[in-house]
Image (cartoon, rainbow, N blue to C red):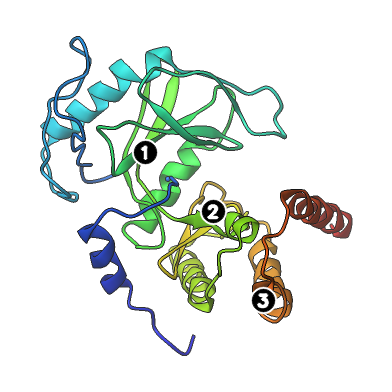
Amino acid sequence: MSEKRDWDHRKNREEQGDMEGDAGKTSGRPDASASDAGKMSGDRGMSDRDDGQQGAGGSATDWEELRAFIERDLLPELELASVDPTEPIVVRKQPRQWVRLGAGNYAGVFTHPKLADWVVKVYAPGREGFEAETEVYRRLGEHPAFASCKLSAEAGGHRYLVLKRLRGKTLYQCMLDCTRIAPSVIADIDEALDYARSKGLYPHDVHGKNVMQHEGRGIVVDVSDFLKTEPCRMWDDLKGAYHRFYVPYLSKLPFPIPEWMMDGVRKGYRLIRGNRK
C-alpha cells in the first residue's frame, strides 16, 4: 500500500465524541457508563456511573460488576434458537430494555442503555465458534478496524462475549441508500486484513454486510471465521467489483439500488462461487 493510514488519529477522534450508526464483536475491562440517571427498577441495575472511556486498566471488581449485570439482567430472559444451521439464528425472546443490534449465523448481538460503548454477543445453543472467536480476538488485540473483546464467559447455558461497539454503516447498506463508499474505506479494510494475517489469522467471509465505513474509514465487523484455513475470495471479489463497476458506474447513479436487486446479486454470486468449487 503506497500510503500508510493514520490509525491512531482515527482512534483518538472516535474516542472524543459520539458516533452515529450501529454495529457490533480477554484482557482489560469495559467501561459500562450509565446513560440514564438512575438504576433500573428493583435490584437488577448496575451501579450508576459516568466515568467516560477508561480503557483496559480497570479493576477486577468492575469486571465482575459488568458480568453480574449481564448474567442477572440479560441471560435468564434471553431465548435463542438454532432453527436451520444454514440460516441466521432466531431470537425468540429478550428482556425489556435490551436492544438487539443483529442476529447472525452463530449468535445474537445486544446492547443496553447502560452499555453505550459495548455490546454482548450471545451464542445460540448448538452453534459452534465461541472458542474460536475468543481466540481470534485474543490474537487481534487492539486495532481500530476491529472490535476488541473485553470479556468471554459462560453462564446458565449461555456463552457470550463483551465487545467494543463498532459504529458505522455496512457497505451493503451504503449501496441501498446511495451513500458514497470512499476509496480510503477499501484501503483501510485491506490493511486491516493484512494485519489479521500477520497475527496468524485467515480472513474469511468478508463481504458487504460484514464490513462498514464511518467517516471515510473502513471497519471489519465480523471475525468469527478467521481461524478457517480454507481460501475465501469474498473480499477480493468485492474489491474487484468496487473498482470495475462501482467507481466508474454505480457511484455516479443518482438513486439507490433496490434491495431486491442487491439480494439477487448476492444469491447469484453464491451460486456461481459454489459451482466453481
Q: Which mark is residue 264?
A: none
- Is the residue marked by circle 2 packed among few (<14), some (14-19), or many (20+) residues within 10 Å? many
Whether residue 173 appears in this view of the structure is: yes
Instruction: Check disc 3 and report the residue beneath it.
Output: 252
Q: Residue 102 at what x, y percent from top left?
A: 52, 37
Q: Earlier in the sequence, mark 3 or mark 1?
A: 1
- Choose mark 3 or mark 1, whichever is in front: 3
Q: Residue 124 at what x, y percent from top left?
A: 54, 25
Residues at circles 3 and 1 in contact by the CB criterion of under 8 Å = no
Amino acid on which the number 2 mark rests in the picture: Phe
Q: Earlier in the sequence, mark 3 or mark 2?
A: 2
Q: Which mark is residue 226?
A: 2
Q: In the displayed structure, would residue 20 be above or below residue 190?
A: above
Q: CA distance from mark 3 to mark 1?
A: 36 Å
Residues at circles 3 and 2 in contact by the CB criterion of under 8 Å = no
Q: CA distance from mark 3 to mark 2?
A: 34 Å
- Choose mark 2 or mark 1, whichever is in front: 1
Instruction: Check disc 1 and report the residue beneath it.
Output: 119
